[in-house]
Amino acid sequence: MVSTRLPNVARAAKDGVRDKAYRQRLQSNGITMLDAYDKPPQRIRDLLKDVLPAKPIKITGDIDTAETRAMAISGVDEGIVKYLFQSLIRDRIDRSRLKFVGNKLLDSLRVPNIPGQDRISTPNPDVYLGYRHERFDNELQGLLGDHDRNLAKFAFLDVELKGDAESTLGGLWAATNQCMGGAATFLNIQNRLQSTLHENSLIKEAEALEPVIFSVASNGTEARLFATYSEGEGNFTMHFIKGFLLYDESSRATLDAYIQHIIDWGTNTRLPAIISALQALRESGVRGGIPASPTISGNGENEDPDSSKIDQEMPDGSLVRSNAGTQVVPEPRQTRSKKRAAESQQGTSKRRKATGV
């Protein structure tokens, strides 16, 4: 059986997402769940219709639901759910272009915390998919700079997993809260790229970047598919698309097909658009990398939401807790693009000095 034990510091960072009030904390930082009676904007609905067709592809091979039926009867630990989903996704990707990452804290500088609000936890996705660093040539890598320091660049799929056994805390509520924070963080990274494109009058390239991140939350017997979109920097809305029963063969087949469609979209549509955008920035003479968002708080440590301590990841993967030190106060949001770009570059310089990056 796969071990589900987490280091105390990592587990502590996840406790907040189980709280009933955590959804309000997300909302106070610009991250909301779309009401069940509301619909996403038309352009988002059109995108979802293209990526997730009414009649999805058929996945070859038989789908064995006996194991998931047993899970529904007797319950399942979180570690088993992680193993099943990680195996499902890892085996489907083109590893020359995509990078699969599991159980790694994201760069807290990109978490969209708003100054003066209670901080949300630094996301630690069970699975996320993005692009390999090597897919961008040396000059494009230089353009990125420290803009996206996550292991997989410009991630587009975030997966959060729980068990439903008696010993498991949180369930789908906690997994969904984690998806909201992770998707908003990934979308925040893309938003800064789009802002930089607009500031350099590269409107066509900016509009080609579809502002959507997909998420899956599961407890081993049920899975829920979400899409998070943005209608402006600092605002993130998660839309519940559909739920799936993993012990039902037809429902499980649809989920598998949708995941494949999302992977295909991320590989064949989104990646070329991002590369084209970066190439356009290079040709326009942009130097010094894409500035970080001035709305982001924190100083780069993996910080618990209500703690003066931080968790530092060591080379062996262990986590060590130490004092947070001096926190850099982020600059306020600006409405004018030129002023925002100048101040965000200044904020990036301050954070680098504070963190030694």
Image (spheres, rainbow, N blue to C red):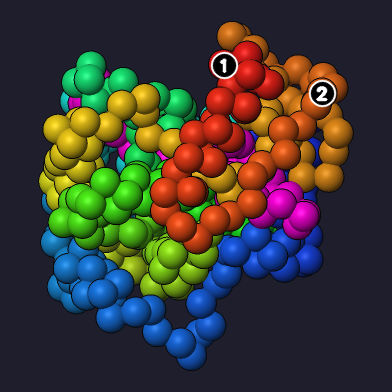
The residue furthest bottom is: 37
Q: Quick one: 172 or 248, which is closer to the camera? A: 172
Q: Are marks 1 and 2 in contact (CB under 8 Å)?
A: no
Most frequent secondary structure within the magenta stretch: loop
Could you classify mark 2 by the number of other residues whose Cα lies within 10 Å: few (under 14), some (14-19), or many (20 or more)? few
User: Counting residues from the N terminus, which is met first, the one under dot 1 or under dot 2?
Assistant: 2
- In the displayed structure, 311 sits above or below 249; it is above
**Residue 280 in the image, given as x and y percentages of width and height:** 16, 39
**Residue 8 in the image, given as x and y percentages of width and height:** 79, 30
Residue at x-position 34% and y-position 79%: 41
Q: Look at the image and tell me whether residue 355 can be seen.
A: yes
Residue 332 part of the magenta segment: no
Could you classify mark 1 by the number of other residues whose Cα lies within 10 Å: few (under 14), some (14-19), or many (20 or more)? few
Q: Quadrant of the C terminus?
A: top right
Image position of 58 (left or right of 244): left
What count of labels does the image hold?
2
Q: Quick one: 339 or 103, which is closer to the camera? A: 339
Q: Look at the image and tell me whether residue 66 can be seen.
A: no
Instruction: Tell me the kind of residue under disc 2.
Output: Gly
Marking on residue 325: 2
Mark 2 residue element = loop
Marking on residue 357: 1
Residue at x-position 56% and y-position 26%: 349
Q: Quadrant of the N terminus?
A: top right
Residue at x-position 52% and y-position 40%: 344
Instruction: Tell me the kind of residue under disc 1.
Output: Val
Q: What range of the chain is rendered magenta? A: 107-136
